[in-house]
Image (tube, rainbow, N blue to C red):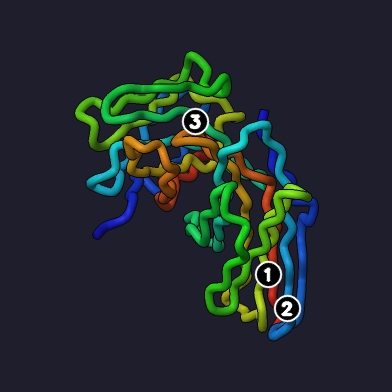
C-alpha cells in the first residue's frame, strides 16, 4: 500500500511565475486535503475535495490559487503570479470518508517546499 | 471556532529521560477527534494517534503514552526513555467530522545524546 505522494518535492521560482504541484492520494481514499505550512507554524488548511467535488476553501486561498481533482484521484494546486509570501511547504493529505461520519485519519505526503525569489 | 494550543515551543532533554508534550484545545462541539503527528526533519507529517471525544481512556504504545482529559481540555503526550530518533516537531490537532484539521504551533523536541 503506497502512501501519499507529492511532486515536485522542491520548487524554486521567481516572483510572478506560475507553479503547479501534484498530489497522488492513497488509492482508495476519497477525500483529499491541501494545507500550507510556514516556518515555525503548524499546517493551515487550504481546501479539500471529496472525490472530484471541492467542498471547502479557506479564506487563505486567494484568487491566485486554484485546486482541481478532475477524476477524483490525483489533485493539482496551482499558484499564479507567485509572491514571496507564497514561500512555504505545501502539504497534501488523504482520508477515507465513511457514511457513518466517523473521523478517519488524514495521512500526509512529504510536501512540496516552495521558495519564491 | 476551534483552537489548539501547544505552549511549549521547544524542549530539550537528555536521552533516556521522560518528556511530556502538552496540548490544550478549545471547541464547542461535543463530538470531535484529537490527533498527534510527528514531523521529522524530512518534513513529512507522521500520524501517531487518534482519539475521539467519547473515549477518555489513556493509551500506551510502546514508549509513547497519551493522557486525554476532557475536564481540562487537554491531550498530553509522554515519551518514556527518550531516544535520539524521537527528535522532531510534534503537532497536536483537532477535527470534527470529516473536516479540516486545526493544528497547534508544534513543539520542537530535541533529545541530547
As helix, strand or loop, the secondary structure at mark 1 comes to strand
Q: Nearer the viewer, residue B56 or A8?
A: B56
- Chain bearing tag 3 is A
Q: Residue at x 73, y 68 (%)?
A: B20
Which circle marks residue B78 in the picture?
A: 1
| Mark 2, residue position | B18
Residue A13 position within the rendered picture, expressed as x and y whole percent measured from the top left: 46, 34
Q: Are marks 2 and 1 on the same chain?
A: yes
**Label 3, label 2: how many angstroms apart (C-alpha)?**
46 Å
Q: How many numbered discs sit on the rendered protein?
A: 3
- Chain bearing tag 1 is B
Q: Nearer the viewer, residue A81 or B75?
A: B75
Q: Residue at x 56, y 60 (%)?
A: B38
- Chain bearing tag 2 is B
As helix, strand or loop, the secondary structure at mark 2 comes to loop
Which circle marks residue B56 in the picture?
A: none
Residue B62 in view here: yes
- Disc 3 residue crowd, few under 14, some 14–19, many 20+, Cα 10 Å: some
Q: Nearer the viewer, mark 3 or mark 2?
A: 2
Quadrant for the C terminus of chain B, please.
Answer: bottom right
As helix, strand or loop, the secondary structure at mark 3 comes to loop
Left or right of residue A57, residue B36 in this image: right
**Label 2, label 1: how many angstroms apart (C-alpha)?**
7 Å
Tell me whether circle 2 and circle 1 mark residues in contact (CB < 8 Å).
yes
Residue A35 position within the rendered picture, expressed as x and y whole percent measured from the top left: 50, 37
Which circle marks residue A14 in the picture?
A: 3
Q: Nearer the viewer, mark 1 or mark 3?
A: 1
Q: Vertical placement of B40 versus A10: above or below? A: below
- Disc 2 residue crowd, few under 14, some 14–19, many 20+, Cα 10 Å: some
Amino acid at each position: 500500500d503506497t502512501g501519499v505522494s507529492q511532486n515536485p518535492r522542491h520548487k524554486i521560482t521567481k516572483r510572478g511565475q506560475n507553479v503547479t504541484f501534484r498530489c497522488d492520494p492513497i488509492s482508495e481514499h476519497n477525500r483529499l486535503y491541501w494545507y500550507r505550512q510556514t516556518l515555525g507554524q503548524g499546517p493551515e488548511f487550504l481546501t479539500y475535495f471529496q472525490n472530484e467535488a471541492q467542498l471547502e476553501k479557506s479564506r487563505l486561498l486567494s484568487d491566485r490559487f486554484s485546486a482541481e481533482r478532475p477524476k477524483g484521484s490525483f489533485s493539482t494546486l496551482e499558484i499564479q503570479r507567485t509572491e514571496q509570501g507564497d514561500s512555504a511547504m505545501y502539504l497534501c493529505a488523504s482520508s477515507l470518508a465513511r457514511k457513518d461520519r466517523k473521523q478517519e485519519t488524514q495521512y500526509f505526503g512529504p510536501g512540496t517546499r516552495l521558495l519564491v525569489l | 471556532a476551534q483552537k489548539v494550543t501547544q505552549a511549549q515551543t521547544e524542549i530539550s532533554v537528555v536521552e533516556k529521560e521522560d518528556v511530556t508534550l502538552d496540548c490544550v484545545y478549545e471547541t464547542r462541539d461535543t463530538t470531535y477527534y484529537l490527533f498527534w503527528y510527528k514531523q521529522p526533519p524530512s518534513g513529512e507529517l507522521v500520524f501517531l494517534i487518534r482519539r475521539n471525544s467519547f473515549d477518555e481512556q489513556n493509551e500506551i504504545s510502546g514508549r509513547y503514552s497519551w493522557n486525554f482529559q476532557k475536564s481540562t481540555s487537554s491531550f498530553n503526550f509522554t515519551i518514556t526513555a527518550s531516544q535520539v530518533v524521537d527528535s522532531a516537531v510534534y503537532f497536536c490537532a483537532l477535527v470534527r467530522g470529516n473536516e479540516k484539521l486545526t493544528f497547534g504551533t508544534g513543539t520542537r523536541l530535541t533529545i541530547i545524546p
